[in-house]
Amino acid sequence: MRKVVYPKPGGVASIEIVEVEDPVPGAGEVCVRVHRAGVNFAELMMRQGLYGSSPNFPFTPGYETSGVVIEIGEGVSSVNEGDRVLAMTGFGGYSEKVVLPESRVFAIPDSISFDQAAAIPVTYGTAYHMLVHLGNLTKGESVLIHHAAGGVGTAVAQICEAYGASLVIGTASSPKSDFVESLGMRFVDRDNEDFVQVSKEMTGGKGVHHAIDPVGGRHLARSYKAMRKGGKLYYFGASAAVKGQNRSRVAELSMWWGMPRFDPLSLMSSNKAVFGVHMGLLEDQSIFQGHLEALSKLLLEGKIDPIIDSVWRFEKIADAQMHMHNRRNKGKIILDFS
């Protein structure tokens, strides 16, 4: 079988596709023939050596996949050979075949496509965890989301509609304005508008109930300012540290230097909350399983439907990642391993 490998930190030219022996599941494990794998910004950061929880180089990235179970190990009972599944691989998903614990494999009905299944775990799982699990999103509340045209941004828009949010403000570059507005968001030009000012103006001077920031640095501090008293801020990325396909020490230092130091007394007096979210390090897998069950129900009810920007053969992984580096995607990027 073939798989994608990051041999060392570098740009997209450093990516390799190698031939290896087929994996064999042990007790409690499942082997999946991968059909689709989602592409996430975290995997671009991993390639540059910026992702703290990555394995040592060389390694195979890939947080999420969908495919068919082709072999099960002793003691596996939740899935059978031939079942269509989605899998939270964490790492290793950019492979034609992958072996992982039974607990990280979830059967999907025939009505859910492999594209949809590979687009749900990271983006929709992250959005649901922030807004619903942590934030208890309530009808009539307001939400600010950055990178609104990306995978998590589009997921946030759909979840907000499903739960009755009254206002969703989405920041993105100007070429994506029509797309962002088509999802029901109030578009904010990230380069030419002040999202703090817009958030205040759109909420009678109070600010939003929820602010979602995948950028970091000084940008995170401004997202905090865009919230009302009692608001919730969710931080789940560090895109400010990535400038182009190659690692930038200047961008890294600038982001870390600009990170806000939240004062507990200020948080207390304003009743604001700040959450750090990293779904890959979520220890209680039952929480994530509950998220997937809820999201599957919303999908089958037609309340959410992953927006697929493009599907690339996995041999074109460098081009697919450059598509994301250049901020061209509108929705989820998928790799085809079928």
Image (cartoon, rainbow, N blue to C red):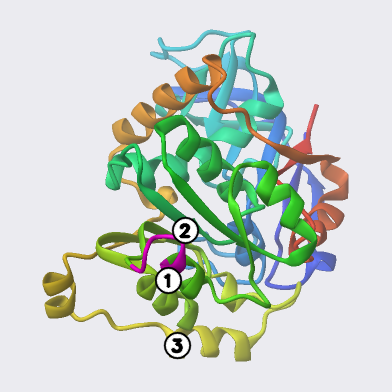
1 and 2 marks in contact (CB < 8 Å): yes
Q: Are marks 3 and 1 in contact (CB under 8 Å)?
A: no
Q: Nearer the viewer, mark 3 or mark 2?
A: 2
Mark 3 residue element: helix
Q: Which residue is mark 1?
A: 223
Residue 227: percent from left, percent from top:
34, 66
Residue 253 image label: none
Q: Which region shows up in magenta?
A: 200-205
Q: Which residue is mark 2?
A: 144
**Which tag, 3 or 1, sits closer to the chain's start?**
1
At label 3, which amino acid type do we have?
Gly
The residue at the point 67 percent across, 65 percent down is 47
Name the kind of residue labelled 2 in the image: Leu
**In the depicted view, which residue is nearer to us: 271 or 275?**
271
Residue matched to label 3: 258
Element type where label 2 sits in the image? strand
Q: Residues within 10 Å of mark 2 (few under 14, many from 20)?
A: many
Q: Nearer the viewer, residue 324 or 147?
A: 147
**Amino acid beneath label 1:** Ser
Q: In the image, 68: left or right of 87?
A: right
Q: Quadrant of residue 97?
A: top right
Give the Cα separation between the discs numbered 3 and 2: 20 Å
Mark 3 Cα shell of 10 Å, populated few (<14), some (14-19), many (≥20): some
Q: Give the vertical position of 10 relative to 101 (above or below).
A: below
